[in-house]
Image: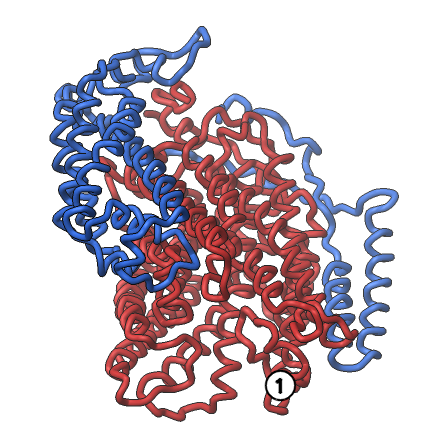
C-alpha cells in the first residue's frame, strides 16, 4: 500500500469569517434563493425534508396522545382526521420524496465526477415547486374550508378515497388544497427525476461505465424512472377529481355512471410503486454505508443492480393488493397475490447480499453502520409481514387494521428513516466539513431503536385484536388500552431521539470535529473532493478504472480493476 | 482512478465555467403555485401567478438564449492526499473443507418434475381409498380438493361432496396436476441440498414439512377444507407421493454440477485474455 496524492486544484481554501451585517445576511440569502448549484439544492431539499419530518412527527405524537387511553378527547375527531391525513401526506410527499432528491442532488454529480446536474436551472425549479407545493398544502390550515364547515386542512386520508372526496361529502376547499398542492409537488418530482436520469446516463466521467457506477447512483436512476412512471397517474387522477368537483365530471361518481373503484386503481398504481420509490434510495444509502463499514467491496454488484431494476419492474404490477377487500375476481386476487410475493425475490437477493458483504468483514459499528444494521433486521421483518398481507384471505381479515399500520411503518420508519439517518451521519462530514458527534449519535440510535420497537412491534397486536386504522378513540372494554399506552410511550421515546439528532446537527455544525476530506476511509469519488467541496466539485475531470476509485489510489499494489 | 490522468490542466485555465445563479426558477415555481392556489382562493391570485410565470419564462429564455449565462469561478489549487491508515489488506481464507461439501454431482431438476408426476399418480390411490372407506364414494376426496376452486359452491353438505360433479372433477384435476408438477419442481430444486438420499427427502422430510405447513395455515386459507380434512390420510397420501417421487428420482442418472468446472467456465466467460489465477481466490 502506498499513499497517493491526488492533486485537487479547487478545494476550498479557509474562508475568512464574515461579519453578519444586514447586507451580508441579504447576500447570503440571495445566494441560496438564486442558486443552481446541485450541492446547495441538495442541502435545501434535505433541510426541507428534516423540517417536515419534525412537523409530521409532531402530528404523529398528537395522534398517539389521543390514542393513549380509551375514550380520550385530547383533540376533537375533526382535528384527528386532519392530523392523520396531514401526517401521511407530509411524510410521503414532503419528507420521503424530498430526502430522495436531497441525497441524489448532492451526491450523484460528485460520485460520477461531474460538475453539476444535467439541467441546473430545472433542478432549481424542481426544488422550488416542491417547496411551494408544501407551503400550499399547509396554507390549507388557514385557507381551506373543510368537511365540518371550518377553515382547515384536508381530512380525507392520504389516500383520499372516492366518494368521500366528492363535494357532497367534502364541502369547502380542504380536499382541493390536498389535490392542488400535490399536483405542484408532482411537477417538481418529475423535473427532479428527469434530471437524475439525464445526469447519471450522460454526465459520467471517463471510465465510469454503467457497471462501475456506484450502486447509490444506479438505485437513484431506477427510483427516478419509477417516479416518472407513477407520478403521472396520480396527477391525472387529481385533475379528474377536480373536474368532478367543479366542472360536472363523474369520473368517480358511482351514481352518475362513474366508479369510485377507478380512483382506488389510479391512486394505488401510484401508491404502491411509491413505496419502492421511497425505499430504493434507502437501499442506495445502505449500499454505500455497509461495504465501507464492513471494509469489504459490496457482494454481488451486478445482482444488486439487477435486483433493483427487478423490484421496480415487479412493483408496477402489484397495486391492487391494496384492494383485496374492495372486491375483485378470484383471478385478479390470485394475480396480485402472486405478483406481490414475487417482490420478495429481488428484495431477498439484496438482503442476502448485504449480509454477505458484512460476513467476514472487519465491521466498524460507527453510527451510520448502527442505523444500517437496524435497517437490515427491521426491513426483513417488514418484508415478512408484507408477505403475510399479500395473501388475500389474510388481508381480508386484517386490512385497514393496525396490523397494516404496523407493517408499513416498519417499512417506512424501520427501513427508510433508519437509512436516512445512516446517510446523514455518513455524508454530513462531506457537506459541512465537520463530524457529527458519535456520542450523541449513539444516544440517538439506541433511543430511536428502542422507541421504534416499543411502538411498532406492539402495534401489530391491537391490529390482530381488531383495532381499525384511523379510529378516533375506542371503548375501554376492547382490551386495546394498555397496548396503546405502551405504543404511545414508544412514540415519545422516538421523539426524544429525534430531538437528540436535531441537537447533534446544530451542535456539530459549530463545534464538531474537523472531518477532513475522507473521514470514513471510503472508496467513491465524493471523498476525493474537499469537505465541503468547491462549487465546481473537481477542477479536472477524474478518470476511473474500477467501482472503487479511491481504493485503487490507496492500494495501488492491489487495485480493484484487476478483478472487475 | 489513475493519478497520471490528473495532470490535465483545467479546461478553462484559471477559472471554471458554471451556470450563473438565477432567480427565474424560484419566480416561475412561485407563479405556478399561485396559478393553482387561485383556484381555491381568488382568481386574481391565479392571474398574478400567470404574470409571474410569463415574466420568469421570458427572463429564463433570455438567460439561456442565444448563449447560456455563466459565471467563471477561480480555481484554488490545493492538493488532497488520498491515503488509508489501514495499510494491511487481508483476504478471506476459504479452506478446502468448504469446497468438499459442495456437491460435484446431483440429480437434474427435470428428474424432480418426473418424480412429481409419478408421485401425483401414486397419491391418487390412498386418496380414493380414503373416500371409499370413509364416505363410500371415490368423489369425496376429488370434490374436497376441487370444491376449493369452484367459486359458487358454498357450504356443501357431505352428500354433495360425495356425489359426482363435473366442475369439481375438472378443477381437482387441474389443481392436482399443477400442484404435483410444481411440488416436483421444488423437489428437484431442493435435491442438490440433499443429493445422497432422495427417498428420505421425498418420502419423509418433504411430506412432514408440507403437512406441517398446511396444518398450520389451512384454517386461514380454506376453513371449509380444514374442517373436513383427515390429516392421517393426508399424511399417508403425501408419503405415497414422496416415496414414489423419490424412487423415480433415484432411478435417474446423476449429472455433474457446475462446481466441478473451472471458475471461468462457471461464469460463462469465453473471451480470451482473461485474468485468471489471482482473481479466483479474491472475495
Residue A74 found in image quarter: bottom left
Residue A131, horizontal then vertical, whole percent = 63, 66
Task: Say which of B86 and A441 sits in front.
Answer: A441
Is A306 on the left or on the right of A556, as rendered? right
* Chain designation of label 1: A
Task: Say which of B237 and B38 sits in front.
Answer: B237
Residue B85 visible? The answer is: no
Figure colour of chain A: red
Figure colour of chain B: blue
Q: Quadrant of the C terminus of chain A?
A: top left
Mark 1 — residue? Answer: A146
Residue A206 found in image quarter: top right
Residue B35 visible? The answer is: yes
Vertical arrangement, residue A406 with respect to residue A176, above or below: above
Vertical arrangement, residue A141 with respect to residue A207, above or below: below
Task: Say which of B210 and A317 sits in front.
Answer: B210
Name the residue at 50% across, 48% down.
Answer: A315
Residue B271, horizontal then vertical, whole percent = 46, 9
Judged from this view, the residue extending furthest toward the top is: B272
Is A500 on the left or on the right of A137, as rendered? left
Name the residue at 31% across, 52% down.
Answer: B163
Is A25 on the left or on the right of A434, as rendered? right
Q: Quadrant of the N terminus of chain A?
A: top left
Give the class, few, some or many, for how many residues have Cα within 10 Å of label 1's Cα (few <14, many ≥20): many
Residue A72, horizontal then vertical, whole percent = 36, 91
Name the residue at 79% across, 74% down.
Answer: A247
Amino acid at each position: 500500500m502506498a499513499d497517493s496524492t491526488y492533486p485537487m486544484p479547487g478545494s476550498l481554501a479557509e474562508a475568512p469569517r464574515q461579519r453578519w451585517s444586514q447586507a451580508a445576511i441579504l447576500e447570503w440569502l440571495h445566494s441560496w434563493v438564486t442558486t443552481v448549484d446541485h450541492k446547495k439544492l441538495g442541502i435545501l431539499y434535505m433541510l426541507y425534508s428534516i423540517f417536515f419530518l419534525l412537523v409530521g412527527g409532531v402530528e404523529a405524537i398528537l395522534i398517539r396522545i389521543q390514542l393513549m387511553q380509551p375514550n380520550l378527547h385530547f383533540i376533537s375527531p375533526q382535528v384527528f382526521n386532519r392530523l392523520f391525513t396531514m401526517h401521511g401526506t407530509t411524510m410521503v410527499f414532503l419528507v420521503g420524496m424530498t430526502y430522495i432528491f436531497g441525497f441524489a442532488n448532492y451526491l450523484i454529480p460528485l460520485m460520477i465526477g461531474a460538475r453539476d446536474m444535467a439541467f441546473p436551472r430545472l433542478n432549481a425549479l424542481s426544488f422550488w415547486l416542491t417547496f411551494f407545493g408544501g407551503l400550499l398544502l399547509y396554507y390549507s390550515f388557514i385557507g381551506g374550508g373543510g368537511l365540518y364547515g371550518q377553515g382547515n386542512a384536508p381530512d380525507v386520508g392520504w389516500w383520499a378515497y372516492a366518494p368521500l372526496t366528492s363535494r357532497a361529502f367534502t364541502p369547502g376547499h380542504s380536499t382541493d388544497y390536498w389535490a392542488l398542492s400535490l399536483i405542484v409537488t408532482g411537477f417538481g418530482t418529475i423535473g427532479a427525476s428527469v434530471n437524475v436520469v439525464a445526469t447519471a446516463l450522460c454526465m459520467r466521467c471517463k471510465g465510469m461505465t454503467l457497471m462501475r457506477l456506484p450502486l447509490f447512483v444506479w438505485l437513484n436512476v431506477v427510483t427516478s424512472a419509477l417516479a416518472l412512471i407513477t407520478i403521472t397517474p396520480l396527477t391525472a387522477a387529481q385533475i379528474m377529481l377536480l373536474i368532478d368537483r367543479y366542472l360536472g365530471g363523474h369520473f368517480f361518481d358511482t351514481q352518475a355512471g362513474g366508479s369510485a373503484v377507478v380512483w382506488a386503481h389510479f391512486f394505488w398504481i401510484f401508491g404502491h410503486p411509491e413505496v419502492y420509490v421511497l425505499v430504493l434510495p434507502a437501499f442506495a444509502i445502505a449500499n454505500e454505508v455497509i461495504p465501507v463499514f464492513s471494509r469489504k467491496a459490496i457482494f454481488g454488484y451486478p445482482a444488486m443492480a439487477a435486483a433493483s431494476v427487478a423490484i421496480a419492474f415487479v412493483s408496477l404490477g402489484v397495486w391492487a393488493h391494496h384492494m383485496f377487500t374492495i372486491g375483485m375476481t378470484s383471478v385478479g386476487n390470485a394475480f396480485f397475490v402472486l405478483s406481490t410475493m414475487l417482490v420478495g425475490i429481488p428484495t431477498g437477493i439484496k438482503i442476502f447480499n448485504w449480509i454477505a458483504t458484512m460476513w467476514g468483514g472487519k465491521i466498524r459499528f460507527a453510527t451510520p453502520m448502527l442505523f444500517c444494521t437496524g435497517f437490515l433486521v427491521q426491513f426483513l421483518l417488514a418484508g415478512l409481514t408484507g408477505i403475510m398481507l399479500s395473501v388475500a384471505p389474510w388481508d381480508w381479515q386484517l386490512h385497514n387494521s393496525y396490523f397494516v399500520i404496523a407493517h408499513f411503518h416498519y417499512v417506512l420508519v424501520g427501513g427508510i428513516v433508519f437509512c436516512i439517518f445512516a446517510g446523514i451521519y455518513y455524508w454530513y462530514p462531506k457537506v459541512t466539513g465537520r463530524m457529527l458527534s458519535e456520542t450523541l449519535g449513539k444516544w440517538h440510535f439506541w433511543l430511536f431503536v428502542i422507541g421504534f420497537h416499543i411502538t411498532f412491534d406492539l402495534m401489530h397486536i391491537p391490529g390482530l385484536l381488531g383495532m381499525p386504522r384511523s379510529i378516533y378513540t375506542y371503548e375501554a372494554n376492547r382490551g386495546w388500552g394498555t397496548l396503546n399506552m405502551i405504543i404511545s410511550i414508544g412514540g415519545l421515546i422516538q421523539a426524544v431521539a429525534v430531538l437528540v439528532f436535531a441537537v447533534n446537527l446544530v451542535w456539530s455544525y459549530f463545534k464538531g470535529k474537523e472531518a477532513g476530506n475522507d473521514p470514513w476511509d471510503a472508496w467513491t469519488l465524493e471523498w476525493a473532493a474537499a469537505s465541503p467541496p468547491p462549487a465546481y466539485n473537481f477542477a479536472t475531470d477524474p478518470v476511473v478504472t474500477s467501482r472503487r476509485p479511491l481504493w485503487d489510489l490507496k492500494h495501488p499494489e492491489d487495485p480493484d480493476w484487476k478483478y472487475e | 482512478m489513475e493519478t497520471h490522468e490528473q495532470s490535465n490542466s483545467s479546461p478553462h485555465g484559471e477559472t471554471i465555467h458554471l451556470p450563473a445563479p438565477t432567480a427565474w426558477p424560484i419566480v416561475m415555481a412561485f407563479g405556478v403555485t399561485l396559478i393553482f392556489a387561485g383556484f381555491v382562493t381568488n382568481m386574481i391570485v391565479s392571474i398574478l401567478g400567470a404574470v409571474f410565470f410569463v415574466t420568469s419564462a421570458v427572463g429564463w429564455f433570455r438567460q439561456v438564449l442565444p448563449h447560456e449565462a455563466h459565471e467563471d469561478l477561480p480555481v484554488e489549487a490545493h492538493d488532497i492526499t488520498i491515503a488509508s491508515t489501514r495499510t494491511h489488506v487481508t483476504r478471506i481464507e476459504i479452506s478446502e473443507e468448504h469446497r468438499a461439501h459442495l456437491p460435484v454431482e446431483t440429480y437434474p431438476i427435470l428428474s424432480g418434475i418426473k418424480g412429481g408426476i409419478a408421485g401425483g399418480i401414486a397419491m391418487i390411490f390412498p386418496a380414493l381409498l380414503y373416500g371409499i372407506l370413509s364416505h363410500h364414494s371415490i368423489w369425496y376426496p376429488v370434490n374436497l380438493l376441487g370444491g376449493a376452486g369452484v367459486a359458487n359452491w358454498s357450504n356443501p353438505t357431505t352428500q354433495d361432496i360425495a356425489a359426482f360433479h363435473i366442475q369439481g372433477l375438472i378443477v381437482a384435476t387441474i389443481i392436482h396436476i399443477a400442484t404435483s408438477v410444481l411440488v416436483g419442481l421444488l423437489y428437484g430444486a431442493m435435491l442438490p441440498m440433499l443429493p445422497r438420499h432422495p427417498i428420505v427427502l421425498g418420502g419423509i422430510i418433504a411430506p412432514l414439512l408440507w403437512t406441517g405447513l398446511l396444518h398450520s395455515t389451512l384454517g386461514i386459507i380454506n376453513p371449509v377444507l380444514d374442517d373436513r380434512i383427515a390429516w392421517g390420510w393426508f399424511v399417508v397420501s403425501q408419503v405415497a407421493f414422496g416415496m414414489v417421487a423419490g424412487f423415480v428420482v433415484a432411478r435417474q442418472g446423476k449429472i455433474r454440477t457446475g462446481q466441478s468446472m473451472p471458475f471461468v467456465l462457471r461464469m460463462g466467460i469465453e473471451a480470451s485474455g482473461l485474468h485468471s489465477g489471482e482473481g479466483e481466490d479474491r472475495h
